[in-house]
Amino acid sequence: MLHSIPVSHIAGVGRAKQKCLADLGLWTVDDVLHHFPFRYDDRSVQSFETFEDGEKITARAVIEGVCAVRWQKGKAICTAAMRVDARSRVTGVWFNQAYLREKLVDGRVVVVTGKYNAKRKTVVVSHTEFSSKSPNADTKWVPVYSVVRGLTSAQMQAIVQQALIQYGSQMVDVLPNYLVEKYKLASHDQAVRMMHQPASAEDLRQAHRRLAFEEFFLFQLQLQWFRQQRGQEHSGMSRSIPPDSWQTFVQELPFELTGAQVRSCEQILRDLQARQPMNRLLQGDVGSGKTLVAFWASYAVFRSGSQSALMAPTEILAEQHYQQALNRLSGFSMRVELLTGSTPEKARLSILNDVKAGEVDLLIGTHALLTENVEFARLGLVITDEQHRFGVSQRAIFRQKGQQTDVLFLSATPIPRTLALAVYGDLDVSVLDELPKGRKDIKTYWLKQKEEDKAIRLVRRELTRGRQAYVVAPLVEESEQLQDVVSATELKQRLDDQFAGFAVGLLHGRMNGRDKDEVMRSFLSGELKVLVSTTVIEVGIDVPNATVMLIYHAERFGLAQLHQLRGRVGRGEWQSYCVLLSDARSDIAKQRLETMVETTDGFLIAQRDLELRGPGEFLGVRQSGLPEFAVGDLGQDFKIMEVARDEAAAAIAGPDFWLLPSFSKLREALQRASDRAFYKD
Ligand code: ADP
Ligand code: MG
């Protein structure tokens, strides 16, 4: 087995090189064979690495996947992924050349000329040549390896070549044949060879596709296998929830639940009654009423005789949940308590005592609840709000806290389904894709900077009607580098004058926690009428009386961020407004703002965000909690992930998975992989 043969068996690897390889984490022949180049220098055309941002470039690339066409004001915008070498992919953007759509097909070799944007990894193509030559006709791809002191990339290349000669034929293909045939995949052996010595971009593409699929398939198999095992380990814990619980809960509500809320509550009820522990993510757009669904879960668990814990990322959010829980749940003679860093010591001890005695039915706090030694008599359910702020390792802790604990995650960040598969592959997902009835759509306007006084007038009008307003700026203080960008501190001073007679508060990330909380509380209580802030405004904050969100330099914010900010208003009975002030010049910024004006649908916005930024950047903002892969790229390869997920599910559902000879090698690989976590955090 190649993973038990030390690197010293490779001819030419002596002590010194062995040590260098060890520094790279390469101990066995198998490790060396799978240490892939991190890029390839194409000696015949320039590499993207050497291009400067904004430079006009000419480069050869291979089109990948399909070309997407979007129409805007009667003009076509085509976008397609282009592979330049194994590691670099860029997005080509063609304006007004819809006729190219048929020619920009998967695998087509092109030589493009256009303007390169290094940050977005895009080329706005002005000239396209379709090469009739095969891609490798005149290219020479030179692999470049990550190395350490004492070992050059060329030496590394020689070692790999030698390893391939000695051991290449012994590489094991773990994928069952039916999958290789079904998806026309290269063999493992072929793919590895192509990664190390590609003759063409097409080689790399095939190698990448095969290896990414293999990796994702194993990952998904592992997730689903764990899940199956978890189910078996904990079988026999089904809760008995009195049948009248649902009726009782619903009767007490002052409003009608949305269809999506009812569906999610039912899914949760089924999970709670099932023999396996619940492990569910509740995804819902801002204002869709997730908290209420969470309360139902905790009420049902209460009726089954167990306790719940609800954790929020900040104290303010925890307090807000506490107030809402008192309103909704006290009527059911459920005892709800709040435990945060500001709970006085005496109260704290008595709460802890009561929790331990089983007298508290729902304990609300920040996620410090977990790390502190809070002991529960019968903890049945853990709920975490704004799940994306918690990493995967924390998810594991929740499960360990009580073996029989059901877990519910709430997230207000809509993630397109395909990505959710990768990020939350081990969870069931409920979606609240419907807003409560009678919610007025937030009116969104995009104004130029010089129309600022219109916005100010709108804010003043709302203030005189008794409403409150948020004003957001991109910076805390004035900056030398960004002289025309307004800061929150500066705005606060200006608005103090403009909104004389109304209390204006300031909130930003450089304030200490206590000051921040105080400002936030004054805004919650209605004492402050205007809150000038950077983006630190809490994600889940609920001030129904606030009806305006005014955002300065809106071009400086991402779509997801703009959507979250807008979600702070429109929570009460009044018409609400979101005003985006911006002199946006770049096309992408303009498209973001147009999207905001066009729609308030969070899932649609997330999808658009993904298209505009590309998945790499989209995911970048929440890197933590994502599994890491050697070859597969979660951003670019999510289609492969989807297929891998379905195939893994099909494989594991088959009764013969553990018996069939075609799975035997796969089983071994899986057992090896189960030690090595895909998750790094
Ligand atoms: P989210 O956390 O999903 O952003 P919340 O749970 O804070 O949303 O709910 C937003 C507001 O809507 C709260 O004030 C809540 O009481 C209210 N609400 C929840 N469900 C409904 C419903 N079905 N009908 C009317 N109002 C609702
Ligand atoms: Mg919420």
Image: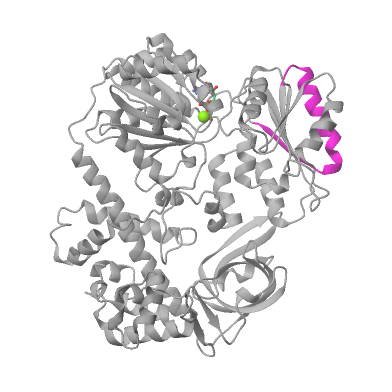
Residue 485 makes an appearance in the image = yes
In the picture, the quarter occupied by the N terminus is: bottom left
* 310 to 123, vertically: above or below: above
Instruction: Please state if 20 lies on the left or on the right of 243 as rendered.
Output: right
* 234 to 253, vertically: above or below: below
Q: Which residue lies furthest to the bottom in this view?
A: 138
Residue 599 makes an appearance in the image = no
* 252 to 161, vertically: above or below: above
Query: Residue at image x 18%, y 36%?
Result: 235
Q: Residue furthest front?
A: 15
On whether residue 454 falls in the magenta region, the answer is: yes
Residue 330 or residue 77, whichever sits in front = 330
Q: Position of residue 464 (x, y in %)?
A: 79, 18
Q: In which quarter of the image is residue 275?
A: top left
Residue 132 or residue 577, whichever sits in front = 577
Q: Quadrant of residue 60?
A: bottom right
Q: Where is residue 613 in the image (x, y as percent from the top left)?
A: 60, 56
Residue 679 or residue 247, whichever sits in front = 679
On whether residue 625 falls in the magenta region, the answer is: no
Instruction: Please state if 669 lies on the left or on the right of 161 as rendered.
Output: left
Query: Residue at image x 39%, y 66%?
Result: 212
Query: Residue at image x 68%, y 36%?
Result: 508
Instruction: Please state if 498 lies on the left or on the right of 473 as rendered.
Output: right
* 220 to 297, vertically: above or below: below
**Magenta: main secondary structure:** helix
Q: Where is residue 197 in the image (x, y as percent from the top left)?
A: 43, 83
Q: Where is residue 101 in the image (x, y as percent from the top left)?
A: 58, 68
Q: What stretch is highlighted in magenta?
A: 442-467
